[in-house]
Amino acid sequence: MTEEAEILPLTREDPRQISRYAIQGRLGAGGQGVVYLGRDPRGRPVAVKVLRESGLPAPQARARFAREVDAARSVPQAHTAAILDADVLAERPYIVSEYVPGLSLQAAVERNGVFTGNALERLATHTITALAAIHGAKVVHRDFKPANVLIGPDGPRVVDFGIARALESGAHPTSSMLGTPPYMAPEQLNEQPAGAYTDVFAWAATMVFAATGRPPFGQGPFAAVAHRILNASPNLDGVPAPLRDVLERCLAKDPAERPAAIQVLQSLIGHGTVVEPESWQAPTEPARRRTGLLVGAVSAALVVLTACSVAILRYASSGDGEPAASRHTGPAASQHATPAASQHTGPAASERTGAAASGNAEPGATDPAEQADPADPEDPAKPRNRWPLGEGSGTQAADSAGEAKLLLHVGAGWDTRPPAPGRNALLFDGVKGYAATEGPAPVDPARSFTVAALARIDRLPAASDFAAVLSQDSTDDVFSYTLQNMHCTAAGKPDRFCPGAGSYWAFSVHETGSVDAERAVAATAAELGTWARIAAVHDREAGEIRIYVNGRLEGIRTLTNPVRPASGPFYLGRATYAGPVDFWPGAVADVAVWERALSDEEIGALN
């Protein structure tokens, strides 16, 4: 049974009504303001935070403050308490959020003892899920701490996300350092820019508190705590492995060395044994610490992935815009986000342990398009274009589903190591080789479509950080979309979508009116010399792009604008950006294009 926080009676100074919300009691108070239990006009309970005048931005900055709060309202409900209403320009500014009956994590540990075993695993998985969704909506919490995690009847909920950032956005110069000292990251103490990596540090410190009853750098005077955060190693005694290893990476002094929230989630769900999902239950009495392995991490993952996993990934890739309306019903994905609603940036590829595709496709399996009757135009599995690339010789490749044959250009030839006996593939030199259609583009990127191919990257590209399996030109001498491999040296380097060091599959598009590509990046690193079936979906109705590796959903990116229309050719082995770029150093086989968004099940059947 969930323990509820004490509701204190109202004082003489407390309001009885805030806008349309009747105020019934006090839930708590802090530096930002007072939180009340309220009722909306329908009688439903809500949490009403009335902000302190002293903590508000200067009047000229209130409009920006309001925009920051609006951004926080777009965060999907993935283990978060939704922001329902706000008016920060009112005489008495307020923010209304979903009421979560339950103790804060701070109070739960103080009252009942530390979290252990499955309870700790679920706490870690659910809260990092929330953080991935928050980051996917381009919101930074900036004050993640035990007091901002509520233990509700359906599990932990993260609250107050984006409020610290909103306050900071218009803060006076003397109040620019916001946060709670034991959970602040080094960059905050140095008054450097804070970002999603700052939240990851605070999340890890909060999980150490949940597991041990103390923050990793201790308590005490601000100067002493700050010194330890900046100079000392975290005290992780009592934190069980493998969670301990994950938290240690998250507590790195250098923000660039910390994983992104979605990658932390992938690390957590990659350990342990799959068991049946359990209902949430926080500790209700002092618990003895356990020092064994986390044996049920995927138990928590199943709760997350069955309820809101696609939501997490949709936003964990730092996506823009409102949550998409559609829901996926296929295999659960392991970000990135965040990330990312249905709701997807990190450690080196060698450190990834999530349950993900190895890159070993099963190219001999039959997919729906092979079973379809080519003469039946109503067959939903039939692609518009398909290039089996079975010729094995010559300078052309036939389109078995349409009429868009591919012409091979210098540097493209037939592979001597095809994906399976009796099959063929095109091999590209990674310097100038490619194949292209003669006629108009196969699909209209402004509408939903799916592309898929078997791909093998043999070496890292010499002249670029990207290599294109396939692409289609837009009307402005840049690609409309491309299915590619992206080589990253670290999180955010050299591209802002890089999840960490490694070589990653990505589906990139140019939105109308933008020269910056939006990318859905696969969660797992690609393996050189290994065939993988890569599929990418532009789901116009859902307003997102998705990437799949060997039938598994691995990345989602929410779009705010339509994809650029296309009029140029369809390419294999290169892309266009003010000229030919990103030549493919490897092989490609069995390429297909559909004029609709395939479902998760259909993508899975391609293997």
Image: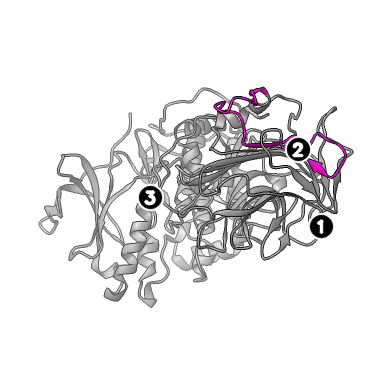
Please name the residue that numbered disc 2 is placed on.
Answer: 398
Q: Can you give x and y, in whole percent of width and height, for residue 195 in the image?
A: 50, 61
How packed is label 3: few (under 14 Cα within 10 Å), some, or many (20 or more)?
Answer: some
Element type at marker 1?
loop
Does the magenta portion include 552? no
Quarter containing the N terminus? top left
Element type at marker 2?
loop
Q: Is residue 117 visible?
A: no
For marks 2 and 1, give the one nearer the viewer.
2
Foreground of the two, 475 or 481: 475
- Whether residue 40 sits left or right of residue 153 in the image: it is left
**Residue at point 43% right, 43% down?**
324
- Whether residue 339 sits left or right of residue 233 in the image: it is left
Res 35 label: none
Foreground of the two, 601 or 448: 448
Q: What's the amino acid at mark 1? A: Lys
Does the magenta portion include 385? yes
The boundaries of the magenta stretch are 371-399
